[in-house]
Image: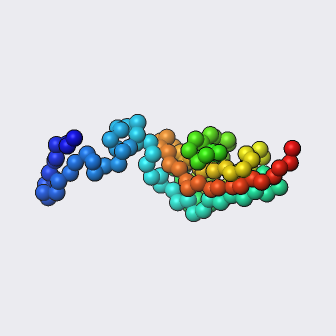
Amino acid sequence: MEYDKVSAITGQVFGPWRYPTAYLQGAHGMNSIPLPIKLNSFEGALVADKVKLQWQSSDDENVAIYQIERSSNNRNFTTIGSVPSIHQNSNSYIFTDSQPLKGLSWYRLKITDEYNHINYSKTVVIKNTNDEF
């Protein structure tokens, strides 16, 4: 299937296939856009049978909340907690998962701004080998 092409004033040809999928989905798909935030780091470690996640950000004045999401398969994520933004220039945040899953777990941040725009961090993989029952 070919779409009708539209030429710009400069003569460059544009078509719908040049835009990301979210753009073609309309307003519903546009909630995953870059936020005015710099996520300097996002790390995690297994400490005393708990997963300690920490991240540093800058320029997060417009961020409303950081939601922490966890997955056992890196596809289906569930929110396990949240941390409100401090709204300052340079911030450090910590979240502890006191009931981590056994085996591999993937963690990510769901970052929501004051206008409900959403962005996701990279994922952090934690291996929990504790066999204590």
Image quadrant of residue 30? top left
In the rendered image, the residue lying farthest to the right is 133
Where is residue 113 shown, x and y percent of the image? 51, 46
Where is residue 41 shown, x and y percent of the image? 60, 62
Between 92 and 4, the one nearer to me in the picture: 4
Judge left or right: residue 53 versus residue 61. Answer: right
Where is residue 75 shown, x and y percent of the image? 56, 44
In this rendering, the answer to whether 95 lies above or below 1 is below
Between 30 and 123, the one nearer to me in the picture: 123
Image quadrant of residue 3? top left
Judge left or right: residue 127 versus residue 12. Answer: right
Image quadrant of residue 60? bottom right
How many numbered marks are there?
A: 0
Q: Residue at x 43, y 48 (%)?
A: 33
Quadrant where the C terminus lies? top right
Where is residue 55 shown, x and y percent of the image? 64, 58
Is there any visible trace of residue 74 in the rendered image?
A: yes
Judge left or right: residue 20 versus residue 12. Answer: right
Q: Residue at x 62, y 59 (%)?
A: 42
Q: How are the colours assigned in the image?
A: rainbow
Is there any visible trace of residue 91 in the rendered image?
A: no
Q: Residue at x 62, y 56 (%)?
A: 124
Q: Residue at x 47, y 44 (%)?
A: 117
In this rendering, the answer to whether 105 lies above or below 25 is below
Between 107 and 95, the one nearer to me in the picture: 107
Quadrant where the N terminus lies? top left
Judge left or right: residue 127 versus residue 91. Answer: right
